[in-house]
Image (tube, grey):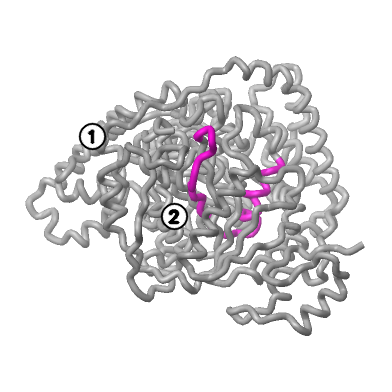
Amino acid sequence: MDKPTIFSKGNVSTEGKNTDNLLKEQNSEAPIHQNGKSSSQLGTLADGHQPKLPLYAKSLRVTVYLLIKVLNVAYAPVFLYRMFQTRSKCSPVTDPILRIPAVDLARKIRRKELSAEEVLKAYISRINEVNPMLNAIVESRFEEALEDARQVDAKVSANNFLEDEAAIEQDYPLLGVPITIKGSLAVKGLKHTGGSVIRKDHKAELDADVVSLVRKAGAIPLLVSNTPELCMSLETTNKLIGTTRNPHDTTRTCGGSSGGEASLLAAGASVIGIGSDVAGSLRLPAHYCGIWGHKPTPGTVSSTGHYPSCNQYEEWTRAFTVGPMVRYATDLKTFLRVIAKPEQVEKLDLDGKPNCRKPRKKHFDVKFGKASSTPANKVSICTVKLLVSYILYVDLKKIKIYYSEHEDYYWRTPNQHCRNAVNKVVDHLRNVCGSEPQKIDAHFSQNVPDLSAIDLLSIEGIEDCFDGNGNGALTELMKYATFRSQHTFMLIMCGVLRKTLINSPQKSRDKVKNIVNKVRKAFDSMLGEDDILIVPSFPTEAQKHGDVLRSIICIGYLSIFNLLGYPVTNCPVGVTSDGLPVGVQIVSRPYGDKITLTLAEELEASFGGWIEPSDI
């Protein structure tokens, strides 16, 4: 039987060819790629065969498959209940202050065009307005934040404050800007529970490293937002706060585990926030809620002060990252520069322009809000001014674009909305970059969910309620079955799977690591330093509450890039016929963050970016 390579691209096809003959053809007559690589080097495994998973990995696949089938049967009463549900969405954003990007807010505060206190009051008012519907907050510090804002205003009022505006902007790029923080990150004096009942009274004694950095940059923390228990779910729900809802449709999930952040940002109740990503847990909420989220290159942002953590530091930070979540893409570079480790800022080179050659003024057809093709009539005046005056000093002609719709992804192919989003971005960048994007075959992805899950769950020493290695998880599962557990189902199942994988034969675990290394080399050989890959963020738009359990295998769309250690930006680019946001992932090689962030700005200027739930 012919076996496909991990993927093919360009003019090289594996269809109808014997693998051995294909490899001979590639080695002898392979066309040369523009960066000097031959097509045979671009993403094929050394033996040209699809990697075979060990038996215990296949057993994991069968177990999850059977679980999903059982859930489909058990959901019959849920489907009946949903027929009587009423969809709600957030009220309109009426205060113009709430429509100003963070970098513009900081500039206006520095120049005394706005006071930090009035900005804080505007956001506190909006939070109080929408949170009863969203249920996104663990604990707030509104009074302390207002006092921080008054101190900022007192500093700004000094006569000599703006003697050197450039220096002030460099030192305080987020001066007076309110910021919300994912509840798994420590904010001094606020609850730091990780959504766990056993930590319900725990309060942070110190700020997490990233929180200290945003304070130093002048930002003012407002609150900590809701997460699943120990961040181990694709839906933001726990037994302390309950379930957080999507501002576009309260019958749907906001995703997880950074769901509280995404919900507040999408509702206009926050302008910038900090999330974390271990298997897409920053990007999935961004996709579901229609905001911008960036998973940075691993190791560039400190995770100190995050709960849960892991005592296997190198293994953990390879897969786990802390990153920015924003309402406006124009804030991403500044925000990432602020929270990056000081020694990593130079490597990220966010001030540099990729392939900078000449200025190019864009034409803007700004469309905010409506799901239809007609222009929306509610457009932010300050945002329009920002976009119209925006000049993109980046020549993107050297960037080569690859894309995939994951057509051969097993168990769940992306729906038409998600495929259209990819094609929409590809068509636009074809014109912008002036090169023909290359579609890659998706055979490579068929083992990704298994590989990603095994890679993550095999990391020992992750903080959880089962001593980090899953001990006691089976007992807790029995308690859950008899309604005696204080933990959530997803956390317990993660413990059970971790216990199983850690006790698997070392030979099998080593085999999985070898397969992972081959997949990583395949991607590395495809993507050059200035190249990008565009893929769906997820195969569906935001799902009904609880449905993420039935599509848990689709986490591979996101977790593959944790597996590879690549930076990824989720970009909202449109809405479905029901008015639900749809995004795409733009992927680059490590330390290619500035490329994905530059393209995010390009897409925001062209497609409008964040869409208000009330405008749909």
- Can residue 458 be seen? no
Q: Nearer the viewer, residue 479 or 606?
A: 606
> Magenta part of the protein: which range?
553-579
Estimate how packed mark 1 is, as few (under 14), some (14 to 19) or many (20 or more) residues with alpha carbons within 10 Å: few
Mark drawn on residue 285: none
**Extreme right residue here?**
1
Q: Residue at x 56, y 31 (%)?
A: 253
Question: Magenta segment: does it hold 126?
Answer: no
Q: Position of residue 595 (x, y in %)?
A: 47, 64
Secondary structure at badge 1 equals helix
- Can you identify the residue that label 2 sits on? 603
- Name the residue that disc number 1 marks: 147
> Which residue is drawn at the image coordinates 28% and 35% (left, top)?
145
Above or below 547: residue 584: below
Front one among 511 and 353? 353
Q: Quadrant of the N terminus?
A: bottom right
Q: Position of residue 207 (x, y in %)?
A: 40, 43
Identified by mark 1, the residue type is Glu
Instruction: Name the side, left or right, on which 371 lies relative to 10.
Output: left
What is the x, y in percent for residue 47?
A: 82, 70
| Residue that extends furthest to the front in the rendered view of this protein | 374
